[in-house]
């Protein structure tokens, strides 16, 4: 039998009681985390979002409540009224904030019962957790875990701080529509069929990009939004089909103004976890980041820069090196300091496998132990091996890992190896935050497969002013190769090896926009079909403008110290974009399909 809730008032949360409350009569409400019976005494841990409080039912002093308490099981929802008493010294629990006291219960109301949960969520470490799929199916139970509750509160505080900061900086929060037309971010759109417009579809925004630019054309000057975005991409563990970003745009802005704004904002947000970010953030151009770290999102918490070994191996006739250099490629290495020489054969094989996943043909190595050993000894001879080790800056005890090939492959594989080695060798200091700006991204990416250029950011990104003449020659003069060297006023904010934000100064001139579409092989008609409304708008007095977007999940992951994006979202989807709790996506009624004039083709 359940009790009526009636008019009973909760006086404190389950995390509130301390020594100073001793002697007070209180009423707590929450979930039963644990019940333990010791004959005439029954103990409870009562849990709510704030914490856990121990309650005790004594057969002698409160026989009715004690008897009733015996009916209670895990996750029942109860209300307990009683007196706060100090625990005996030996019974204190320093692990919980309320551990000095307990509630001597007089009355209990059983407000609701609960089935036995399908998994144990009162666990102290993540090792004890049930499979993630099961927990996602019963997300509302998994969310009862204090860790997830803390993450969601941290997320709330971060977003609240962002709103405060943006308001102080005189930005206006503006909502842009969700049912729109294809956006230019380059991923696949999620589409929604229209009932009223036969055969037509809305697309969900991959970002509010064009709307925020239209806000600038509209003279709104400083826009921001905590925007939900949808991208139908091939999912990776750290991606979600829908996610949230802080999206902002400002008129008459230079990159410097965007950097200063974001640095100020991030500094404020990191204060929430007691971290003072070093300002200003260091900067690397894209070219330099690729050259020195093999990545456009380098983790600067450790060094291990890529070393160019071309001149050290020049003249040797080791075929893979010679071939790489002869075809305009590179030979580069990273030096694993202190302990590198102790890398086992097995570890080196595993690292080679890792490098191969990023396109490397093989991984050559040198270990400077008591004597120098190397996979290159036979091919290069001892002197050359020493020369290479020296060129890599290696000292006794170090190892050098070397990859040869096309510049792109060398960067990708050594960049990935650098992160992997740092992880394995524990070179990453804890609680360290290493932000930076990566600037001057290339305008275009060339796709070898279809022989076409694609925008590296999106097609509304402005080229660097000094590259404009080059751009005209490339597009109007037909020297398309030049497009490869063109740089954009595009920047990413990177922290600890992950991209947390990206943006650019936009094109505000119609003539430059025309060149970009032409470079992308998009006819004027095609461009009009997709973005006509926007191209028209560009002709009505568009101010120079620029902005950035920041992944809220990624940011909160850093703040919360988790690598699982689902840990910072209330109702996330699986890696295959399914919601296991509500069982989405799902089929819809034939009638609904009819209304939409949609037939489902057989597979
Ligand atoms: N729209 C871009 C994105 O979502 C951000 C920007 O350019 O401001 O990545």
Image (cartoon, rainbow, N blue to C red):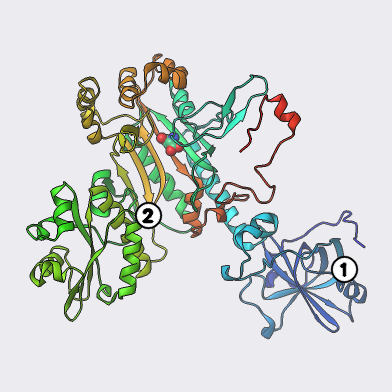
Horizontally, is 436 left or right of 573 in the view? left
- Local crowd at mark 1 within 10 Å, few (<14), some, or many (≥20)? some
Residue 161 % position (x, y): 52, 46
Residue 342 % position (x, y): 28, 77
Task: Indicate the secondary structure of the residue bearing disc 2.
Answer: loop
**The C terminus: image quadrant:** top right
Mark seen at residue 584? none
Task: Indicate the secondary structure of the residue bearing disc 1.
Answer: strand
| Picture quadrant of residue 317 | bottom left
Q: Which residue is disc 2 drawn over?
A: 497
The reply to whether residue 169 is visible in this rendering is: no
Q: Nearer the viewer, residue 214 or 128?
A: 128
User: Is there CB contact under 8 Å for labels 2 and 1?
Assistant: no
Ligand 1: give its quadrant: top left
Residue 185 % position (x, y): 44, 34
Q: Which residue is disc 1 drawn over?
A: 107
Q: Is residue 516 above or below residue 438?
A: above
């Amino acid at each position: 039998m359940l009790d009526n809730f009636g008019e009973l008032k909760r006086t404190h949360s389950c995390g509130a009681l301390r020594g100073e409350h001793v002697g007070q009569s209180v009423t707590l409400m929450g979930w039963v985390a644990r019940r333990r019976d010791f004959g005439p005494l029954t103990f409870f841990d009562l849990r709510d979002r704030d914490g856990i409080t121990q309650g005790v039912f004594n057969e002698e002093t409160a026989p009715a409540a004690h008897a009733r308490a015996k009916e209670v099981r895990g996750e029942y929802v109860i209300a307990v009224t009683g007196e706060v008493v100090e625990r005996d010294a030996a019974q204190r629990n320093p692990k919980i904030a309320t551990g000095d006291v307990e509630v001597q219960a007089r009355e209990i109301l059983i407000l609701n019962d609960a089935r036995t949960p399908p998994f144990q969520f009162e666990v102290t470490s993540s090792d004890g957790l049930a499979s993630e799929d099961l927990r996602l199916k019963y997300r509302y139970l998994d969310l009862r875990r204090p860790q997830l509750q803390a993450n969601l509160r941290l997320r709330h505080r971060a977003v609240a701080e962002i709103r405060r900061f943006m308001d102080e900086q005189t930005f206006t929060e503006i909502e842009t529509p969700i049912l729109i037309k294809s956006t230019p971010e380059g991923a696949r759109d999620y589409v929604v069929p229209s009932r009223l417009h036969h055969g037509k579809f809305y697309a969900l925004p991959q970002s509010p990009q064009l709307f925020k630019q239209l806000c600038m054309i509209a003279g709104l000057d400083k826009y921001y939004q905590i925007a939900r975005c949808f991208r139908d991409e091939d999912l990776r563990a750290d991606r979600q089909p829908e996610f949230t970003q802080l999206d902002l745009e400002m008129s008459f802005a230079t990159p410097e103004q965007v950097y200063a704004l974001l640095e100020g904002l991030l500094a404020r947000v990191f204060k929430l976890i007691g971290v003072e970010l070093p300002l200003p953030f260091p900067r690397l151009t894209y070219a330099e980041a690729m050259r020195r770290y093999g990545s456009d999102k380098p983790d600067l918490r450790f060094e291990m820069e890529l070393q160019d070994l071309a001149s050290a191996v020049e003249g040797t006739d080791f075929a893979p090196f010679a071939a790489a250099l002869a075809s305009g490629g590179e030979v580069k290495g990273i030096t694993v300091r202190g302990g590198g020489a102790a890398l086992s054969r097995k570890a080196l094989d595993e690292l080679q496998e890792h490098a191969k996943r990023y396109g490397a043909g093989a991984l050559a190595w040198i270990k400077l132990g008591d004597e120098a050993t190397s996979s290159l000894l036979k091919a290069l001879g001892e002197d050359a091996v020493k020369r290479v080790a020296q060129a890599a800056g290696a000292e006794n005890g170090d190892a050098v890992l070397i990859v040869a090939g096309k510049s792109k492959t060398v960067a990708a594989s050594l960049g990935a190896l650098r992160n992997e080695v740092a992880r394995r060798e524990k070179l990453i200091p804890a609680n360290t935050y290493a932000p930076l700006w990566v600037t001057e991204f290339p305008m275009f990416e060339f796709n070898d497969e279809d022989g076409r250029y694609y925008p590296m950011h999106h097609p509304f990104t402005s080229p660097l002013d000094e590259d404009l003449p080059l751009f005209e020659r490339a597009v109007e003069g037909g020297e398309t190769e030049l497009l490869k060297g063109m740089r954009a006023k595009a920047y990413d904010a990177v922290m600890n090896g992950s991209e947390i934000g990206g943006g650019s100064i936009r094109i505000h001139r119609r003539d430059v926009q025309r060149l970009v579409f032409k470079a992308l092989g998009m006819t004027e008609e095609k461009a009009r079909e997709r973005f006509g409304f926007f191209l028209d708008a560009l002709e009505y007095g568009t101010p120079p403008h620029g902005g950035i977007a920041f992944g809220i999940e990624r940011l909160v992951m850093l703040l919360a110290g988790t690598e699982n994006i689902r840990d910072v979202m209330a109702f996330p989807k699986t890696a295959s974009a399914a919601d296991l709790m509500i069982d989405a996506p799902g089929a819809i009624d034939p009638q609904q399909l009819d209304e939409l004039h949609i037939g489902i083709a057989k597979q």
